[in-house]
Amino acid sequence: MSSFDTPNGSVVTSYAKAATRTITAGGVTYAYRELGPKAGIPVVFFVHLAATLDNWDPRIIEAIAKNRHVITFDQRGVGASTGQVPDSIEAMADDAYTFIRALGFDTIDVLSFSMGGMIAQDLLLKHPHLVRKLVLTGTGPRGGQDIDKVASTTYWDVLRASLTCADPKEFLFFNQRHRQAGREGVHQAPAGAHGRPRQADQHQSLPDAAEGNRKFGRSAPSDLSKLTHPTLIANGDKDRMVPSILSEDLHRRIKGSVLIIYPDSDHGRTQVGVLLSR
């Protein structure tokens, strides 16, 4: 029986019912979940700034897990994973590689969102043979115009949310028109084995992760022409966190990539668009 089958042998496709597992590698214990059929190349999800594996919208996870082996995980120092949050995207990519290889995989597909897309880029540049296909949603390239400002936008919206007792993602990911639908998605996050992440778990990881984002934005651009993987780049035309101009920049840098800009879509709705177009 696989680690994500039920006792009666049926495949788990509900994110709320997927057990939270741990694996230790490189001195770090990583928390992760698996669901969907075990066969085939897994899709590993790379989540956004300071987020835990509970921050994925189950509607996205479960739709893909109907046909694919899905893996979500907490980066070092975030959520239920141990250790200190790195202050560079390169180090986060190294951690992701350590985690993936500890699970025994030598080929994966990647679905990444926001800062997760930055981590995915560094992972591919250092370990190009690990990844078969890549999806970059709501993200941008190293050294991209104003990408270092993502952290300051995050801090501002965390403050706004605290003043209204709201979840910060309601402000960060959704504009006013879509905020109610976004609120419904936020509150669908599963409880999981270790409970929903406390706000403190995310905020404690924010300063180091935000510093990694700033360094990424202020560094010299990476040579993304080295990436030859089939790549889908997606964003919304109303993304205030990572404006679509950055996705257009990524598209120019990654040869053969496909770019989709969804109309009337903000940061959070980009993932839904990718799901509908897959």
Image: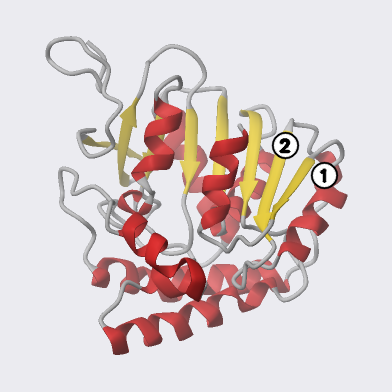
Task: Indicate the quadrant where residue 35 lies.
Answer: top left
SS label for mark 1 = loop
Q: Tell me which residue sits at (65%, 75%) in the image.
A: 148
Quadrant of residue 115 in the image? bottom right
Looking at the image, which residue is at 35% across and 64% down? 183
Q: Are marks 1 and 2 in contact (CB under 8 Å)?
A: yes
For residue 149, above or below residue 79? below
Q: Nearer the viewer, residue 123 or 251?
A: 251
Amino acid of disc 1: Ile
Q: Position of residue 149 (x, y in %)?
A: 63, 78
- Say if residue 115 shows up in the picture: yes
Q: Which mark is first along the chain, 2 or 1? A: 2
Residue under numbered circle 2: 231
Q: Nearer the viewer, residue 193 or 124?
A: 193
Image coordinates of residue 26 in percent, x first then y, are: 39, 42
The reply to whether residue 78 is visible in this rendering is no
Asked if 98 appears above or below 93 in the picture, the reply is: above
Residue at 54%, 22% in the rendered image: 106
Q: Is residue 22 left or right of residue 255?
A: left
Q: Is residue 43 left or right of residue 205?
A: right
* Dot label at residue 254: 1
User: At x 66% / y 66%, what residue is drawn?
Assistant: 216
| Whole-percent x, y for residue 225 in the image | 86, 44
**Few, some or many C-alpha atoms within 10 Å of disc 1 (few <14, some 14-19, many ≥20)?**
many
**Figure check: 196 above or below 205:** above
Q: Position of residue 268 (x, y in %)?
A: 50, 59
